[in-house]
Image (cartoon, rainbow, N blue to C red):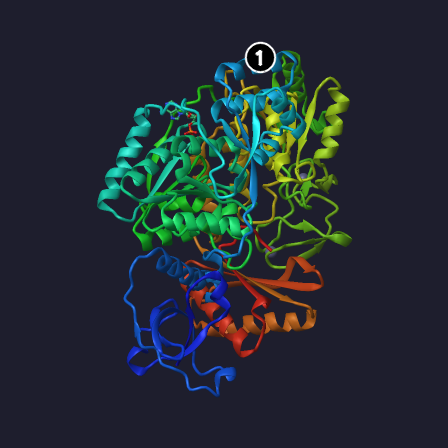
Amino acid sequence: MVAEVIIDISHKNLDHTFSYRIPERLKADVQVGSKVEIPFGKGDKIRTGYVVELDEEVKKENASYTLKEIAGIVPKSVSAEENLVALADFIHRRYGSTMINALKTVLPVKKASNKKVRQMIVSDVPEITIRQGIQIAEGKKQRAKVRLLEELLRSNRLSYSLVTGKLNVSSSTIKSLEKDGFLSIEVMQSSDTPFAFRKEEDAIPTLSDEQRTVVESIEADRKVHPFGEYYIYGITGSGKTEVYMRLIENCLNEGKQAILLIPEIALTYQNLMRFYRRFGNKVAVVHSKLTDSEKFEQFEKAKSGEISIMIGPRSALFTPFPNLGMVIIDEEHESSYKSETMPKYHAREVAAELCRLSLSSLVMGSATPSLESFSRIQKGEIKCFKLNKRLTGGELPSVHIVDMKEELQSGNRTVFSAKLATLMQDRLEKGEQTMLFLNRRGYAGSILCRDCGEVIKCPHCDISLSEHRGGVLMCHYCGYMTDMVKKCPKCGSAKVAGFRAGTEQIEEEIRKRFPQAVVLRMDADTTKKAEDYEAILSRFASREADILLGTQMIVKGHDFPGVTLMGILLADTSLSHNDYRAAERTFQLLTQAAGRAGRASSGGETVIQTYQPEHYAIVHAANQDYEGFYKEEIEYRDFMEYPPCGHMLCVQFFGPDWNRLSRLSLGLTKEVSELFTEDAPKQIGPGKAALGKKNDIYRQVVYYKHHSTEPLTKIKDFMEERIQTLSLNREQLQFDFDPMNTF
Ligand code: ADP
Ligand code: ZN
Ligand code: ZN
């Protein structure tokens, strides 16, 4: 037996492994991930390394050497590095990727960085002067100036790019304020903290009784259970973040560190500033816009103890803290926590493993928990605490469900129901703001009857069919194909068609019907640059527009006190989206969206326009009733054996030659079927993937379903082995456990 060993573990060294023979006495103990002692170099100095691969025999290129032997195994300890290697091993086993690739996921890339300089906006003038400046700017309606000056009241050092980006203040505005003596521009090194704080920090609120109970219960439980999982279940504004901050503070007091995962889209200026103001320069942030070397720098600071709190999306999990105490996952239900590239890991599962390894606590929070987590709460595996009260004031809006089939019957062919149009007119007259959410998920061609709301589904999978070129309908799970239907199978109506409405068309229609309204549109086209997103939000927040029209992006966690009407157009397109999570996703989106109106005061209203007014996802979302939704949805998952009631493995095959690819997928799946004599996983496919060909590479897909993960892992292991014996490229096969999307 031969082991491939990495010495001096780092991202840079991952491609240089060294082969060592495993002596008989160590055979049972050496595994992938083991830390071993090996003789190295001319003097055979003993060094330590990690085993990343085991082979039966010596690789050809090494055949002429006499391999040295592994000298011994280093007992496991709990350093940050060893936790990360163990985590990589978990990812490699659980999700199917090489150990090297898994290590590449968890270890930061070290890159020589030419220190980037950063420009800072610094203000030394007294507060009173700034307040006078604000008054003058307000009088002249110079909104950008007001925004920047107000921010300078809170912190007197701001990063230049943050101001031009997130606050949407142009450089000419900054120059003009510089000329008037309100600020100056300085240059600093990139690793310095980009903020400084005036003395008047946010007052730390006294916890509500509910919040105090949560903090105290978790603290008490952590003392007896070194590794525990907790859930804080409460609507937006119920005080979850404040609870996170208390728990983090306690961690720091114990000399430990904390990781807070937040979906990228919620890493907004306001959210981050809240943490900076509370914890100052103990906080670091990683996000997708950082370069590799900037990210590396943040991780080095974590290692050296310079910072104690890391905030960021998925990859923040791999922060090498020396003494991790807690991982918090906010908006736990978000699908962005699942990686869409190999290894396709789920941050929630990896976080749980990290907490097990490092004896830390895992805290999750959401208003609409994932079905996975809520079913574990029901089983008592996660301790759940509920926050019932909204601390921001304001009442839940009243919700109207409008049946769009009736609108059509009464001759209304526009996208706005009579109810919504009337309310929009009313808000315009009162000078209040409206948000319009176009639910476009699944817009890629589901077929729906405009008379009865029936969605055309696959007879084998209960998943909606999608329209493809040439008028064929196809199931993305099993490959079932049929001609485009001419009539609704339920009511016989000829009005069956796919959805075609986009934000642009709707914007046009608003301009025609409400010519006096100022409209902002937010979608993929208007937010090409990262700053655009915050710029639109901040313009809407400062009431530069009456109506904000947009896709999913407008729904996530932003408070607009001026909004008293939320219109949800096409609520059910995401219901007909072709995968088993469609109802869950729709419920989450609608619940969030419905809660948007009426933050500030009473009188908020939400209109949900739908073709399926009686669908349980829509009815429960209108009532903000998560548990009601959960009960119905879990029954469906149970009946169909979809996660979390069963498990799924999706295997994707890639190749340039369609015939060879078909033979490969058919051959491999046949061999797999011979692996099991009883209780075999259910096989669906292989079939053409939804995206059947990309860049001249064909794609096939096969799904396996089973009530436990073990046989699915067995299939994955078997296929991986076959890739090697068939000398196939590893890139030709990808594995996805409990997929978030279908392919
Ligand atoms: P969530 O994370 O559930 O949306 P937050 O923690 O952000 O809730 O709280 C919502 C708002 O209420 C914030 O503006 C926050 O500052 C405020 N808040 C939170 N806890 C308290 C408290 N105990 N007393 C007063 N205000 C609070
Ligand atoms: Zn099917
Ligand atoms: Zn019909």
Q: Residue at x 39, y 25 (%)?
A: 389
Asked if residue 398 shows in the view, the reply is no
* Location of the C terminus (image quadrant): bottom right
Q: Residue at x 51, y 22 (%)?
A: 397
Residue annotated with mark 1: 135
- On screen, residue 139 above or below 553: above
Q: Is residue 233 left or right of residue 475?
A: left
- On screen, residue 123 above or below 488: above
Q: Tag 1: residue type? A: Gln
Residue 605 location, quadrant: top right
How far across and down, in percent of the image, does residue 723 sit?
54, 73
Secondary structure of the residue carrying numbered label 1: helix
Residue 709 location, quadrant: bottom left
Could you tell me how many numbered marks the image carries? 1
Q: Toward the viewer: 123 or 631?
A: 123
Mark 1 Cβ inside 8 Å of ligand 1 = no
Asked if residue 529 shows in the view, the reply is yes
Residue extending farthest bottom: 64
Q: Is residue 421 left or right of residue 7?
A: right
- On screen, residue 124 above or below 16: above
Q: Quadrant of ligand 3?
A: top right
How far across and down, in percent of the image, does residue 640 sit?
49, 52
How far across and down, in percent of the image, does residue 242 sit?
38, 30
Q: Toward the viewer: 376 or 27?
A: 27
Q: Toward the viewer: 180 or 455?
A: 180
Q: Toward the viewer: 304 or 544?
A: 304
Label 1 Cα neighbours within 10 Å, binned few <14 / some 14-19 / many ≥20? few
Residue 691 location, quadrant: bottom right
* Location of the N terminus (image quadrant): bottom left
How far across and down, in percent of the image, does residue 513 sit?
75, 21
